[in-house]
């Protein structure tokens, strides 16, 4: 499937399926005692992503195969920063595509999107205590910048995240 991937702007009709992708990923992480995405993402967060044109999805006959949200700023996590950067959030791939290349395909798409929008950096974060995901991002060309403490999307608690970035360059 990855050779024919079309990344499309998400719609309000995608919110429940996007929530299902996040819930599936959250359960997979919890089953492995990884403290990332343990709190549900409120519908209003994903709805805001759709409203502001920040949700992007990969659709297939069986439903959403993958998703990510993007933003042109992220002061809550990265602090005030004048860098021209694109921030990736809520990158999730359906269980049926785990181990395939869809996650990397979405990251490549995000790099291209960042380049098209004249950004210098593609940035993201993950739980500090998720060594597998940290290796995944490092193997995808991201460099660890620093660790931070941030609130969960619903504001109920805080947790440590590792911040990563990669330069966006023309190939």
Image: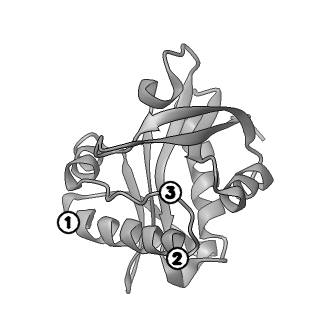
Could you classify mark 1 by the number of other residues whose Cα lies within 10 Å: few (under 14), some (14-19), or many (20 or more)?
few
In the rendered structure, the answer to whether residue 11 lies left or right of residue 130 reads left
Which percent across, then down, holds residue 85?
Answer: 56, 28
- Residue 20 falls in which quadrant of the image? bottom left
Residue located at (57% from left, 73% from top): 4
Residue located at (46% from left, 35% from top): 150
The residue tagged 3 is 36
| Total marks placed | 3
48 vs 7: above or below: above
49 vs 23: above or below: above
Find the distance from the CA under tag 1 to the CA under tag 2: 29 Å
Find the distance from the CA under tag 1 to the CA under tag 3: 26 Å
For the C terminus, which image quadrant?
Answer: top right
In the rendered structure, the answer to whether residue 52 lies left or right of residue 99 reads left
Residue located at (66% from left, 58% from top): 133
**Mark toward the start of the polypeptide (1 vs 2):** 1
Find the distance from the CA under tag 2 to the CA under tag 3: 11 Å
The residue tagged 1 is 13
**Mark toward the start of the polypeptide (2 vs 3):** 2
Q: In this orientation, which residue lies closer to the viewer: 11 or 24?
A: 24
The residue tagged 2 is 31
Mark 3: secondary structure: loop
Residue 151's disc is: none
Which percent across, then down, holds residue 73?
Answer: 44, 27
Q: In this orientation, which residue lies closer to the viewer: 144 or 171?
A: 144
* Residue 89 visible here: yes
Which percent across, then down, holds residue 132?
Answer: 71, 62
Is disc 1 in contact with disc 3, using a CB cutoff of under 8 Å?
Answer: no
Mark 1: secondary structure: helix
Residue located at (58% from left, 18% from top): 83
Could you classify mark 2 by the number of other residues whose Cα lies within 10 Å: few (under 14), some (14-19), or many (20 or more)?
few
């Amino acid at each position: 499937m990855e050779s024919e991937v079309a990344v499309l702007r998400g719609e309000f009709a995608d919110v429940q399926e996007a929530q299902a992708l996040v819930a599936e990923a959250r359960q997979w992480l919890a089953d492995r005692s990884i403290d990332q995405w343990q709190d549900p993402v409120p519908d209003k967060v994903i709805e805001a992503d759709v409203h502001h044109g920040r949700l992007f999805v990969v659709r297939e006959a069986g439903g959403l195969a993958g998703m990510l949200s993007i933003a042109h700023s992220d002061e809550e996590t990265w602090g005030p920063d004048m860098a021209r950067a694109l921030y990736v959030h809520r990158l999730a791939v359906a269980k049926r595509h785990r181990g395939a290349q869809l996650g990397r395909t979405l990251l490549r798409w995000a790099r291209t999107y960042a380049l098209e929008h004249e950004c210098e950096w593609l940035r993201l974060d993950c739980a500090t205590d998720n060594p597998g995901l940290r290796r995944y991002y490092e193997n995808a060309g991201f460099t660890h910048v620093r660790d931070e403490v941030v609130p969960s999307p619903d504001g109920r608690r805080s947790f440590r995240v590792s911040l990563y970035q990669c330069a966006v360059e023309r190939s």
